[in-house]
Amino acid sequence: MRENTEDFYADRNMFRGSGEFMPTPDVAMSLRVITRAKSQKISEVAFRYAMGGRRKKVTAVHKGNVLRMTDGLFLQAFRQVASRYPEVKAEDRIVDSTAYDMVLHPEKFDVIVTTNMFGDILSDEAAAFGDTSWHPRSTLATALPWPRPSTGPHLTLQGKGYRTPPYPRYSPCPCSCPGSLRGRASGTWRR
């Protein structure tokens, strides 16, 4: 699950104007916005999903070793929410090792919760191992989540003779969409 209203995305992290700017012709900068409220909200959704789906673990994915303030705040909020769900194991992992393990050891994950940019990248990675038209990604609104179509480079392979891998598909990025939409056997989305 990803919080998709904040982070480095310049079109949504400012009240007015863009979060990207160039102070000189040779320097470009981008602002990252992470709030406690939004981090708590997405963490709460992840833990509720884990409880409702009988999941045993929620993993917060971050880059707190480099983005100490913004991902530090995300992790504080995550841990605060996790303390209210003692029956669900809470862990945090650096995004680099998470991306690696999603490919080689996806069984290590139950529910992943992260910030916008990391969630965008990891959901596209997960889609590479699942159905190329839908994968477990959703947009969380106030009351109802809805599945979103896949985006990313894998869509350019459709109709060109490529197919998904022959091994059983497993997706480490469950979202909170209704169970009837979720493919039971493969863990991938079906239309």
Image: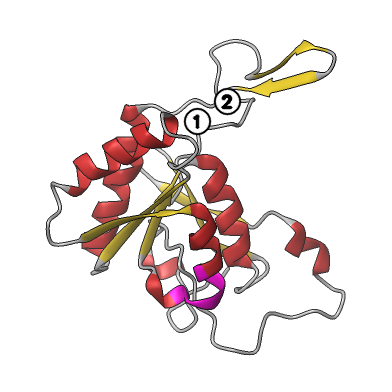
The quadrant in which residue 154 appears is: bottom right
In magenta, the rendered stretch is: 101-106
Q: Can residue 108 be seen here?
A: yes
Q: Nearer the viewer, residue 73 or 44?
A: 73
Residue 11, above or below 17: below
Q: Residue at x 54, y 56 (%)?
A: 96
Q: Position of residue 166 (x, y in %)?
A: 65, 89
Q: Residue at x 57, y 42 (%)?
A: 117
Q: Residue at x 55, y 62 (%)?
A: 99
Residue 43, above or below 59: above
Report the amino acid beneath label 1.
Answer: Glu
Q: Nearer the viewer, residue 52 or 24?
A: 24
Q: Residue at x 60, y 73 (%)?
A: 130
Relative to residue 112, is residue 56 drawn left or right? Answer: left
Q: Nearer the viewer, residue 95 or 42?
A: 95
Relative to residue 143, is residue 116 drawn left or right? Answer: right
Report the amino acid beneath label 2.
Answer: Arg
Relative to residue 46, is residue 168 drawn left or right? Answer: right
Mark seen at residue 109: none
The residue to which callout 1 is attached is 6
Disc 1 packing (10 Å; few <14; some 14–19; many ≥20)? many
Disc 2 packing (10 Å; few <14; some 14–19; many ≥20)? some
Mark seen at residue 12: 2
